[in-house]
């Protein structure tokens, strides 16, 4: 069996050839050239000056990172094209290609057959017969692209895509995930991943054996320590269960100790006895703590159909603050704890976020938690704000004008800062 090559380098020339071979429309992909520099830097970081196994590993990380959506489809398409490019122009066998890419040979054969039939549809039967594998150990596992020359198929006749392939013009730089992917390919994928993959190819059997031995030693030591700890704990539990109790007399009241009858007359004896009993009972009653009054309140949530009612609600909140300072159980428990929650719907949540950010700067609004205002999370954008009371009505009115909104009023357990009203804004992506 021929030796499988482990290191096949892709230089800048091969990277440029692959870019031309894929027929990617640079203007369309980069939004008419606005992100052309970023895309070319991404392409060089992904394909230039790297070995084939490292490039496939990078593509696998990008695919697993996107998981679903147009970017996921584009990266799967790019990996398939790079797989066929390596088979056509790098003189690799199917077995070598499967070993380097970590892709099952059945998947490679299926993609290659589908690709060649789309270009040479008149030779479908011959291509299928040549790529037919009776079993994985067949001699056809060592099939190279030069073996297709007997069917009249040459490398000069092959291009990666047909004219109607939409993947060549997909505007990938406009998707929100692009910025994260671009940073990842320049940092972790470029440095740490390359080092890890090269390490897998260069490690000797002795180094692997030593690492496994160290790991087993650490795990074994932890297990022994855990067993010793559990054994001591079990001994303590058993010792407590078999504890021998001895009589304890510390509970006796020294005031009721025996007194000699000879020192007391009959009347004095009864009088002193009753006085001592009364003293003990009254002391017990006085020492018994009175249960504190417990009261419970329920929070409510009110839908404010119009922002015209907001000033009234704020005045009531200020009045409650004054009553809370004067005293009273209910005022202390509530205080100035009202908040307003604004639920919005938007087909362009990022643009809506920008509009609200302008209002935040205009009215000197502060953020209500440690997160940045206008944080983008799956499903939309949220704001946690402290709005000055004197600007609350005007602020919410202008937010209402931005898009369809519903306003809620509720209470929290944490009072608002003086002169501030907490406003939570959720922009749902529809």
Image (spheres, helix red, strand yellow):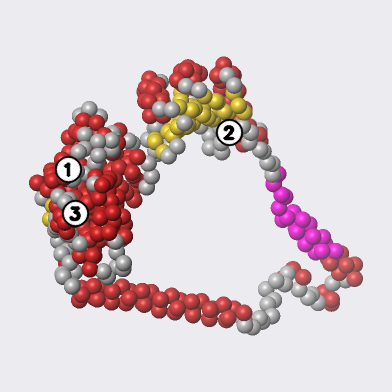
Q: How far separated are the C-alphas under marks 2 and 1?
A: 62 Å
- Residue at x-position 14% and y-position 61%: 7
How busy is the neighbourhood of tag 2: few (under 14 within 10 Å), some, or many (20 plus)?
A: some
Going 20% across and 34% down the picture, which residue do you hit? Answer: 26
Q: Which mark is residue 151?
A: 3
Q: Does the magenta stretch include residue 286?
A: yes
Q: Which of 98 and 401 is in front in this view?
A: 98
Residue 261 position, x and y percent, is 84, 76
Residue 102, percent from left and from top: 27, 60
Q: Tell me if residue 364 is in the magenta stretch.
A: no
Q: Which residue is drawn at 17% across and 43% down?
A: 21
Residue, disc 2? 411
Answer with mark 3 or mark 1, whichever residue precedes in sequence. 1
- Rendered image quadrant of residue 305: top right
Residue 339 rendering spot, x and y as whole percentages: 54, 30
Graded by Cα atoms within 10 Å as few (under 14), some (14 to 19) or many (20 or more), the crowding at tag 1 reads some
Q: Is residue 394 above or below residue 173?
A: above
Q: Which of marks 2 and 3 is nearer the N terminus?
A: 3
Looking at the image, is 207 positioned above or below residue 35?
below
Q: Residue at x 32, y 35 (%)?
A: 175
* Prevailing secondary structure of the magenta residues: helix
Q: How many marks?
A: 3
Q: Mark 1 points at which residue?
A: 21
- In this view, the residue in front, 122 or 110, is 122
């Amino acid at each position: 069996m021929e030796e499988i090559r482990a290191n096949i380098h892709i230089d800048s020339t091969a990277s440029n050839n692959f870019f031309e071979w894929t027929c990617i429309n640079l203007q369309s992909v980069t939004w008419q050239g606005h992100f052309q520099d970023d895309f070319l830097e991404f392409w060089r970081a992904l394909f230039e000056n790297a070995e084939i196994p490292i490039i496939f590993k990078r593509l696998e990380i990008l695919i697993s990172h996107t998981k679903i959506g147009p970017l996921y489809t584009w990266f799967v398409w790019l990996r398939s094209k790079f797989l066929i490019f390596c088979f056509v122009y790098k003189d690799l066998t199917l077995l070598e290609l499967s070993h380097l890419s970590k892709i099952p040979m059945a998947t490679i054969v299926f993609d290659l057959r589908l690709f060649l039939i789309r270009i040479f549809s008149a030779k479908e039967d011959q291509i299928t017969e040549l790529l037919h594998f009776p079993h994985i150990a067949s001699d056809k596992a060592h099939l190279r692209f030069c073996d297709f020359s007997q069917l009249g198929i040459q490398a000069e006749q092959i291009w990666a895509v047909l004219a109607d392939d939409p993947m060549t013009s997909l505007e990938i730089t406009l998707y929100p995930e692009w910025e994260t992917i671009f940073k990842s390919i320049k940092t972790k994928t470029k440095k740490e991943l390359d080092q890890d993959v090269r390490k897998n190819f260069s490690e000797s059997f002795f180094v692997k054996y030593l690492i496994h031995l160290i790991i087993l030693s650490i795990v074994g030591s932890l297990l022994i320590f855990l067993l010793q700890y559990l054994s001591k704990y079990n001994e303590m539990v058993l010792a407590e269960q078999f504890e021998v109790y001895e009589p304890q007399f510390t509970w006796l009241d020294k005031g009721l100790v025996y007194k000699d009858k000879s020192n007391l007359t009959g009347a004095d004896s009864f009088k002193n006895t009753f006085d001592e009993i009364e003293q003990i009972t009254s002391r017990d009653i006085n020492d018994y703590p009175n249960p504190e009054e417990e009261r419970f309140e329920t929070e409510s949530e009110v839908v404010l159909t119009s922002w015209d009612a907001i000033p009234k609600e704020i005045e009531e909140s200020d009045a409650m603050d004054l009553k809370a300072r004067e005293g009273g159980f209910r005022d202390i428990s509530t205080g100035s704890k009202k908040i307003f929650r604004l639920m919005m719907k938007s087909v362009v949540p990022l643009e809506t976020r920008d509009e609200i950010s302008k209002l935040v700067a205009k009215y000197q609004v502060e953020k209500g938690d440690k997160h940045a205002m206008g944080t983008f999370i799956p499903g939309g954008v949220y704001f946690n704000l402290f709005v000055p009371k004197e600007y609350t009505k005007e602020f919410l009115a202008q937010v209402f004008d931005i898009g369809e909104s519903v306003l809620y009023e509720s209470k929290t357990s944490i009072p608002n800062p003086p002169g501030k009203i907490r406003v939570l804004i959720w922009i749902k992506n529809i």
